[in-house]
Amino acid sequence: MGKFAEVFLGILTAMGGFVEIGELTFTLNAGRRFEYALLWIVLLGTVGIMVYCEMAGRIAAVKHQAVFSLIRERDGFSAGLLTLVAASLVNVLTCAAEVGGVALLWQLLSGWPYRALLLAALVFFVVVVWSTPFEWIERIFGLGGLLMIVFMVLAVRLEPDWASVAAGFAPSLPRPAGGRDTLMYTFYGVALLSSIMLPYETYFYAAGGIEDRWKPSDVTLNRVVVIVGFSLGALLSVSLVLIGAEFFKPRSLDPALPGTAALAAADSFGNIGLYVALLGMFFAFAGAAIETALSAAYNLAQFAGWPWGLDKRPRDASRFALAWIAVFVLATVVVMTGIDPISVVEYSIVFSVVVLPLSYFPVLAVARDRGIMGPYANGPLANALGWFYLVLITVAALAALPLFVATHAGQG
Amino acid sequence: MIPRRRRHAAWRQAAFLGLVLLVGGVGAALYNQRPANEDDLAIPIGELRSQGFELALLNDNATRGRDRRFVKAHAHQLAQSIERSRDELASLRAAAKFAATRSAALQRSEPLLDAAGQFGAGRAPLDAATAAQIVAVAEQLKSLEGTLKR
């Protein structure tokens, strides 16, 4: 494949895979509650995920080392094990929310019972990951996720006040400041930041670079894909905030189900809009389910030093294969209990932010080390941004759980 | 073979994690035992308000020829959410001064379940009187929620 086509497909895949069920829920509700006031968090989080995915991708291209082998090497066994346990818990919870989301979407299309569809989803995921090469998984679900563009078209059609939208990109506090509003605003800010910077995205991105056999000459490709692909993905997040403000707020409606988001598209574009939105969400949620399950297996295999990768036959990487199957099974069991997938999302998003500093510090430490990375080490800008985001996510991690309790998980 | 020092460290970490979970669990149980205040009550009432307005929107879309299978399945999912919110509201130990508000919200939200049931049985769109009742119920719940948040 030509370089241009590779870059183009990489960008589209990064864009299509940007939004999952957690981000969908939090962006729509952030717009519903605070109109455009949290748009600056979307911008802040997008630059943050770009900074760390670019570093992790660069390390993968230059040193062929993935995130969790760095974590064990840099943090030591004990701290590394703690990070592994926490990251695995977050991955299972996120995967459970995505599997539940897929079953809810299938129910909207078929009318079949939810629990039967959860089992069908489990079989579907295991068969797809078992039988499909890594590159095809990335492409099919990333490109399918582009159907979510229907929400970008909807946001424009709702004719928001563009001057107010632009003002939303400047950091602000809710008015009147103080009290419960400020607490809710801060919780939504932290949750939105976490949903955009979900740690599995970095684990998966770096492992994907190694699966795709990136070389040092691919460092520029990595940078272009991250910057352009994630910027376009962020436009989708911005669109969801606008839909929350322009469609759901005037109707006093707090979107809490995937079907509610689809209903917004149906209201403007009829049945075609409905089907496109449902399909777009299916590819986005299914892609995220696969990425979280594989991330958990990558992390475990990299930490333990087992052979890993979808290019290996399962018998040659049996513990890796068993790990991703176990994650799908565990995730399905979680949602089989009858727990609402959206509640699972809330927990996974809050616990994710706690894992972020532990996951990102080793990435920054290696990416800035000239002794390891040579001429590919961070420049002054990457270092400054890396430290800035590390401090930011550490503060967010410390604030996340108290905010979660104080705001009843952002409900009031 | 894992070195003994590392095994001990792993056990210490597991014990610490267990202790944190135990303290958290006991804390959460004690927190849930206290009488519900206005913020606690406003959450399920706000959910019911939102579900009421969503039923109205779904009905509006059903009248405009939206895919019947989608309308039926989405109403089924909404009915489950309504039941969950009503159960949550019913399970709250409301302080005496909020008991009337809780009862009013439970009573007023009953037509939402009936309407979602009608959709679920494939009887969409709703007749004009039921559709108007749903909007009225959602507005009443909004007003109750507003009183609690004031």
Image (cartoon, rainbow, N blue to C red):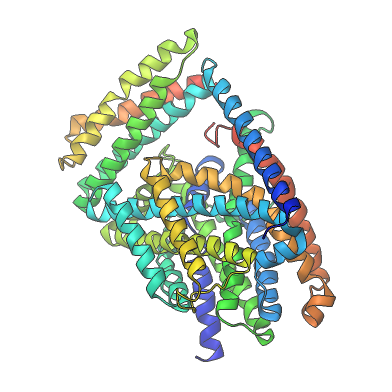
Q: In this view, does A31 lie to the left or right of A104?
A: right
Residue depicted at x 36% and y 45% = A336
Q: In which quarter of the image is residue B2?
A: bottom right
x%, y% of residue A196? 59, 56
A67 shown above or below A246 = below
Residue depicted at x 59% and y 43% = A188
x%, y% of residue B101? 42, 15
Closer to us: A406 or B147: A406
Residue A174 shows up from this direction: no
Residue depicted at x 28% and y 62% = A272
x%, y% of residue A110? 23, 55
Closer to us: A274 or A157: A274
Q: Quadrant of the C terminus of chain A?
A: top right
Closer to us: A331 or A318: A318
Residue B43 shows up from this direction: yes
x%, y% of residue A128? 37, 69
Residue depicted at x 41% and y 23% = B89
